Amino acid sequence: MAAGPGLAPRLFPAVLLLAAAVAAASSSACPPQCSCDVGLVDCSRGQVAAIPQQLPAWIKHLDLSHNRLVSTKDSVFEGLHTLLEVNINYNLLSTIPTLGAVAANITVLSLTHNQLTEIIAEDLLPYSALETLDLSSNLISEIKTSSFPIMQLKNLHLNNNRITVLEPGCFDNLSNTLLVLKLNRNKITVIQPKSFRLPQLQYLELKRNRIRIVESLTFHGLDSLKSLKLQCNGICELKDGAFWGLNEITELDLEHNNLTEVTKGWLYGLKLLQHLHLSQNAITRVSADAWEFCQKLTELDMTYNQMTRLDESTFVGLNLLESLYMGDNRVSYIADGVFSSLSNLLTLDLRNNKISWAIEDSHGVFTGLVKLRKLILQGSKITSITKKAFSGLETLEYLDLSNNAIMSIQENSFAQMSLKELGLNTSSLLCDCQLKWLPQFLKEKQFQHTVTANCAHPVWLAGKNIFNVDAEDFICDAFPKPLITAHPETTVALRGMNVSFSCTACSSSDSPMAAVWRKDRELLYEAEIQNYSSLQEQDGEFVEYTTVLQLRNVNFTDEGWYQCVITNYFGSNYSNKAELTVNELPSFMKTPMDLTIRTGAMARLECAAGGHPMPQIAWQKDGGTDFPAARERRMHVMPEDDVFFIVNVKMEDMGMYSCMAQNTAGGISANATLTVLDEMNLPADIPSYLSSQGTLSEPQEGYSNSEAGSHQQLMASTTHGYVHKGTDGICYVDTGSETDADLLTTPFGTNLHGRMGSLYAGRSSFHPSEPREGLAQQVNPGGTSGPLVICSDCYDNANIYSKNREYCPYTFLAEEDPQEHALTGSFAVHTQHEGTAIDSLVTEADVSVSLTNHDRIRNPASTVQLHRKESCPRPPWSSSTDSGHSHYSQQPVTIHKNPQAFLQGDDETEDGAEPPVAKNRLSQRSLEQSTGNERTLAMQAHGATT
């Protein structure tokens, strides 16, 4: 039957609806080789080589991992407008896949375990919305500056590749958005400073690379970084400022490296750091100021290092620390109060160290841990616990003492704590009357399930659990543990002496005893020890054991506290600590020298001494403490410069001054005589005057001393001149005739003019720039051919004490000396002035023309060679330099007319009498005297020939 004319129009819409329904059904169907869930299509582990066709349009997550995909086709992803995440891990891709127009919507792309060898920016351009890119476990070897286009990437994972090079700036195109960067398990050896210019980055991982040294400013530019992980790199050095710029970092992981020290240099800038993990390194010490720049730490992990001691400064500055892990080190020394600054510490882990002595013989090791809740001491070689071992831990709730062979626990050792859990397992307990309290305490606290405690002694209780021992069986009928009966005694010794400490203990057990000695709580490994053991019978048999520590030739480094520790099978006992103090008698390094000066000048005496302890210096005058200069405030003492001086010297200051050095070992003293000359009564005949004062006629050498304490001696020579002798030089002055002026130079620059001082009336001054001939004529106006002697005062105080005395160079200038013209024509005016005495020295003291070593150094051209026939014989050791005490002026020099204006005589001294300067010579001058006499004879003979 034929269809009606209106049937076809009615069927056409129905066909269209059916086709649309079929198409919709096919587009929403799950591919046969995949599984589907809400938004997820999982086509993994099918070993397919091509992506399934007709993926459902509603897909959001596509998993294609563990297949054999080599590439992808754009057509497969057409119409998948809701697709956001694509996982193509564990395939054979060699390039980043193309997904067509859908790539612009992808936010997560994971391509781990493929065969990508490089990152090409063009391949990433279509992924404009990509936030997470995981390229881990590929074959990428370098990251170039051209690797990434400008993207909105937040997470980039490049773990387990073959990356060796990070070009500076390679991540710059990701700087605005990148938050997480992982570069673990690569082959990076060097990170160039400022390679990471990623101001938004918060997490950076560089674990398991090959970085050995971290240079300064390596991570500069990571302004927002909060966590940095550098584990397992073999880092052996962190340069100062290695982490500078990480202003926001709170976590730094450096485990499994080769660091040896914690210093403030590489911690510089980590002001907000809270978690520092240094486990599994080779750290042996923490510098005293290590935590200066990161005092906000709340967690510090230093387990599995090589720390042997915890000093008082180890944790200074970590006031906010809450968790400290120091387990599995080699700590054997814990200073008292080492934890005193950790007032906020909650957890302390010291497991597997050698801190038995810190617990057994401590007096406040844990002082300051007022908030501590958990203390772990397992495996710490602890054998006994004293009642003060845990003093200060009132808030402690958890204590782990497991894996320690504990033999004794004193009563009330745990009473002060707020224990809620106790870990204890030992089979070495000495179950005597002193342990009777323990079972009852453990039962009251309900610690039976966490405590395993068995007896080892007495024999009839060996192996028995303490909870099963009757109270009346805890008896004390012996003392098997060593009992110290004689303690070492505090000793004071002089340096170089031999010292011994002895200690005696006894025990009722036949268990052999052994002894060790400690100094300042540290074991003496190479000490000289003698041990004696004997059997005694007094109220029963017992063994007496004596140990003697011998210290040979003690020095200051031997000072400290000594203690013996005597041990047997049943435990250890500790003696009292005995202090050794080593002293050294004072010895002078500088001694005061006899001094002769004029009134109004400044007297300067030096005195310094060494010893141990450092000696105190005191001064006396004439055996007492009455100093006229002190009453008038003219006396000054400068201990830091070892100087005692008197300004504006007066006659009443004359006398013997004694320097005394005193410490606990003893005292010594040295004397020096101060002679003051009144220049108003100076005689005209200077040599005769000095002879009458004992300067020439007495066997002792007479010295005319400068304010600086140096010595000069005036000695008679031929009828035509003087010999000017001092410890600083020897100069022969030939005046040519009795009518010539005699010029003598004292160390403070005063000219001592002889008998013909009136010859200077014609010309009273000259300028240093005048020609050399004019100068010679002024000084020697007679015009004779006798040589002019120019002596320099090159005295150096240090030479007195080093016994290396050097003598002044001197020059003879004849009138026709051809080398005169080699001089520059300038002469330094040699004066000396110090402190408040400078005015009197400039205005009152006459100055001499002197060519000093200072001038020779500054002006080598002015040095004149000596004439062999005219020059004084020079001692073989005479090679002097200027002491630096003199001051030089280029002002015109005034020659005084009256020679009595320069020296003042002593009216009360008779002719031939010996003045004080000759009566108080130091014993060390005897050698000087004999040498000086020989020089005098030589000079006199030489003067006769000239």
Image: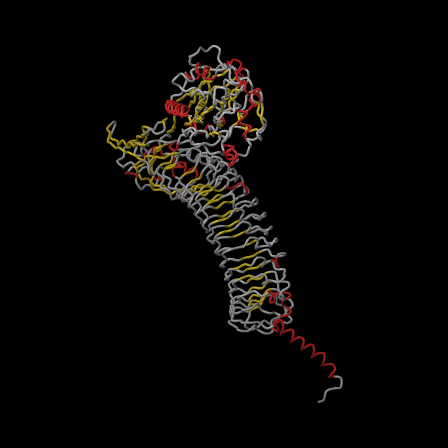
User: x, y percentage for residue 493?
Assistant: 36, 27
Q: Is residue 644 above or below residue 122?
A: above
User: x, y percentage for residue 305?
Assistant: 43, 46
Location of the C terminus by quadrant is top left
User: x, y percentage for residue 261?
Assistant: 46, 45
Residue 422 lies left or right of residue 44; in this view the side is left
Q: Nearer the viewer, residue 142 or 45?
A: 142
Residue 699 lies left or right of residue 648; in this view the side is left
Q: Nearer the viewer, residue 221 or 168?
A: 168
User: x, y percentage for residue 718?
Assistant: 42, 21
Can see residue 665? no
Location of the N terminus by quadrant is bottom right
Q: Is residue 141 above or below residue 861?
A: below
Q: Residue furthest right?
A: 5
* Residue 50 location, quadrant: bottom right
Q: Nearer the viewer, residue 131 or 907?
A: 907
Q: Residue furthest bottom?
A: 1
* Residue 177 location, quadrant: bottom right
Q: Is residue 503 above or below residue 911?
A: below
The residue located at (57%, 55%) in the rendering is 195
Residue 801 lies left or right of residue 510; in this view the side is right
